Amino acid sequence: MENLGGKYNGAMQQRAGRRVVLFPVPLEGHISPMLQLANILYSRGFCITIIHTCFNSPNYSKHTNFTFHSIPDGLLESEASTADIIAFLALLNANCATPFRDCLAKLLSDSSEEPVACMITDAIWHFTQAVADSFKLPRIVLRTSNVSSFLAFGSLLLMQEKGYLPIQESRLEAPWTDHPPLKFKDIPVINTRNPEVFYRVLSDMLKETKVSSGIIWNSLEDLEQSELISFGQDFPIPVFPIGPLHRYFPASSSSLLTQDQSCLSWLNTQARRSVLYASFGSLAAFDGSQFAEIAWGLANSKQPFLWVVRPGLVRGSEWLEALPTGFLEAINGRGHIVTWAPQQEVLAHPATGGFWSHNGWNSTLESICEGVPMICLPNCGDQLVNARYVSHVWKIGIHLENRLERGEIEKAIRRLLLGTEGREMRDRIMDLKEKVHLSLRHGGSSYQALDSLISHISSF
Ligand code: UDP
């Protein structure tokens, strides 16, 4: 874990009295990186105010150094569901505009508070750019995913404008020549009731990022150098690739769900690098038959596994009712199932040998940081791009290529945990892990980007 503590005292004097207002999108994969960024800025001497929605409110008691302001998000109980993530995000952008503006106006007019230097809002909160402009306050964007998928979203929009979407079934395996080595099937589409809303949310996100006062990436130059150059050609704004954000402070405590610590004592009983950790993040969902294939793939591999089955992972089931008959007998104690794990600690545990992931960007980055090779099962959006980079660019994972079938799963697990191929992937990911580690040390790329970010905010 990197240590920023030494910077604290000098920084405090230098920047005493400047406040930064942050506004996270209330989803697991977005709220944690924003709170991690808040911790980093606090350690560099800024006062921190977090504006947040009532939905998925952060736990104040875990962040006693920050000031929190809650705004009404107007979500009805029936709407506070993330099953259609695009409809959900569009609704939140519409509902939060006025409450956010009112909250900010109050903050800015409160003379007992430190003056606000700037606001930092998630790229998805596109309406906040107009609010920032109206108060003549600089807005810096936090993009919690990576540069390659952001570029792919831009190209997706161009293809949509030219009428090239959707891609014919027969062409899905063909290379997407704008983005080697992506294939057409990796175009980061997100299924939604109304695709027009998806294109509008994307287009607003890109447009408002372009006119912002800068962008912070939870990524790093050593992973995405050429992608950062391409981004700079289209987006003439200051860029701060300071990631991975979760490496600045000990395992983040900002998880919205309660992490079951029993995983760690169970891992303690397992052999070194023997366990497959399977987890598909906070949003992915499967139907009963897909879930059964996953279960039998895990069982038939005959390898120990730790499996996160989140309530909601199986559509129409509360929790484990959809496990196939005979599964528990077949695994004979070789598996441990929990509702939510302390993922970073699990990945760092010596018994963990592989990670079967949906390739959300946080999970992918956390796996790289712990040197754990992956099996890739992306579901939608940026996960499709991340999975292709993991398997075909960095070569640190096996892509399932949508073959959610027990025999394919069993083979992939055995290749990863037992084969030469798996060992070679582990060697490559250990090299990447080292690169990431160096980027955060004095003089490294993320370290320098963070210094530039601090100067940038101080200049407002
Ligand atoms: N996570 C966790 N426990 C789990 C599964 C996931 O704490 O059992 C955390 C994980 O460490 C990561 C986040 O949830 O930081 C998931 O973010 P990601 O971007 O990977 O996926 P998303 O949930 O946004 O699809």
Image (tube, rainbow, N blue to C red):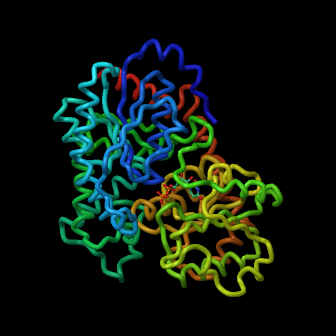
Residue nearer the viewer, 403 or 459: 459
State whether residue 385 appears in this view.
yes
Position in image of residue 104 (x %, y %): 26, 34
Q: State the image quarter where residue 276 is shown.
A: bottom right
Q: Position of residue 247 (x, y in %)?
A: 58, 39
Could you tell whether 456 is left or right of 109 in the image?
right
Residue 242 as seen in the image, left or right of residue 160: right
Q: Position of residue 124 (x, y in %)?
A: 32, 51
- Reply above or below: 53 against 177: above
Residue visible at 42% across and 29% down in the picture: 48
Where, by quadrant of the figure, is residue 201 drawn? bottom left
Quick one: quadrant of the C terminus? top left
Q: Which of the pair 261/303 is nearer the observer?
A: 261
Residue 445 in sight in this render: no
Q: Position of residue 96 (x, y in %)?
A: 26, 49
> The N terminus lies in which quarter of the figure?
top right
Number of marks: 0
Compared to residue 167, the image places residue 458 above or below, namely above
Residue pictured at 65% horizontal, 55% vertical = 372
Residue closer to the observer: 201 or 18: 18
Between 384 and 61, the residue placed more toward the observer is 61
Q: Residue at x 23, y 38 (%)?
A: 102
Viewed as shown, does residue 284 lie left or right of 253? left
Residue extending furthest bottom? 325
